Structure formats: C-alpha cells, structure tokens
Image: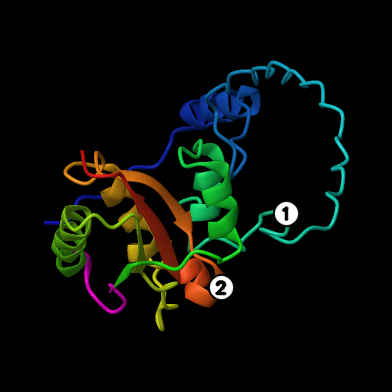
Amino acid sequence: MSRKRRTLTPEERALWDSVARKADPIRKGRSSVPQPAPVAKAPVPVKPQAPVQVPVPLPRFRIGSNVDHSRDHDLMASLAEDMARTPVRMHRNDEAKLKRGKRRPEARLDLHGMTLSQAQPALVRFILEAHRSGLRLVLVITGKGKERDMPGPIPQRLGALRHQVPNWLRSAPLGGLVVDVMPAHLRHGGEGALYVTLRRRG
C-alpha cells in the first residue's frame, strides 16, 4: 500500500519562506568554518659577505728545477772529499810523490767485478799478507762502478766497492795495519783504484 505524499499547509509554507529569507546562502567551494589568520614569518637575518680575495698568481717554475740531481746516484761523499777531511799521516814527500804517480805500488789486488761478500775476505787476506811480507805501498782496484740499466725509485750507490773498501781498510782487522788511503794516480787507475800505505812491521 503506497503512502500518500503530504503537502505543506499554508501556515507551514509561510513559516518556511520566512526562515529562508533570513538564512545566508552557502556558496559553492567555500567552507563555512572560519580559517585562522596567517602567521607572519620572522625575517631571515642577512649575513655580511666576506670581501672577495683576488688570488695572487705564482711565478712560473718547474718542479725540481732548483735541485742538484748530479749526484742522485751517489749516497756517500767521494773518496777525494773524504780524504780532504782526514788528516794525512804519511810524510809530506811521500804524499806528494803519490799524488804525482811517482811511487810504484809493490803489489796489487783487483776487486773489480766481485760482490761485496767476495771482496771483503779477499781484501783482508791481501792486506794481511802484504803487511806480513813487509810491503809499504799496495794498490787496490775497486772500479768506478757501473750505471744500472733500470734504476729504481730509491737512489743506489754508484760503485759499491769504491765506497765500501775505504771503510774496510779503516776497520778491524785492517785498521791497525793501514797508515793512509788515497785515490790512485791516473796511471794506476785514478778514481777506480786506491793507494794503501801500510805500517812497518814492528
């Protein structure tokens, strides 16, 4: 059974029209809820700018241009420089004759081509035998040293024997038998050989 639709009475219609006239219409897209007022943002402090520094151009240069590389391979002073700091104990006349190549060595030992481990015992035997035999001047050939075909990043001594033999001659058991060590004259080998003056037998 369908329900009959009720219509407004004249009194109800008049009341509805009165309320509708007093009400504010709702506008589409706007909310009736009041919105909070926007909060003002605090101003961002401005930092003072540092003065702009203009870079000063460097003078033109090449790395290592002021370094003397002439002796990078030689880690020790030369024998001549070492001898200049060591006082000579032989007589001046004998020293002058040696420097001019006027004295002839009484025996010679050639260490050229030997390793350090081979050369040291050979040198000790030679000097002990020469002193036992009463010799006063002997020649020890060390060689000048050979440039390495493939040098490494670490400097290497050029002529290990040339540097090490004078140290052996000044150390035990030979130091007490040796008076002086000097570079040989050119006619006897120059920088690749040494004059060794021995003490007299006691």
Asked whether residue 161 is in view, the answer is yes
Q: What label does residue 66 carry, if any?
A: 1
Q: Which residue is mark 2?
A: 186
Q: Amino acid at mark 2?
A: Leu
Amino acid, disc 1: Asn
- Of residue 84 and residue 160, the one placed in the foreground of this image is 84
Q: Residue pushed farthest bottom?
A: 149
Which residue: 58% across, 44% down?
A: 29
- Please state the horizontal and vertical placement of residue 72, each as a whole percent of the image: 53, 61
Position of 6 compared to 84: left or right?
Answer: left
Q: Secondary structure at mark 1?
A: loop
Hey, which quadrant is residue 136 in on the image?
A: bottom left
Q: Residue at x 72, y 59 (%)?
A: 65
Q: Is residue 37 above or below residue 146?
A: above
How many numbered callouts? 2
**Of callouts 2 and 1, which one flags the residue occurring earlier in the amino acid sequence?**
1
Could you tell me residue 169's position as x and y percent? 29, 50
Write the start and end of the magenta stretch as one range.
Answer: 109-116
Main secondary structure along the magenta-highlighted residues: loop
Q: Is residue 114 magenta?
A: yes
Residue 95 point in image, percent of width and height: 54, 50
Colouring used for the render:
rainbow
Identify the image quadrant of the C terminus. Answer: top left
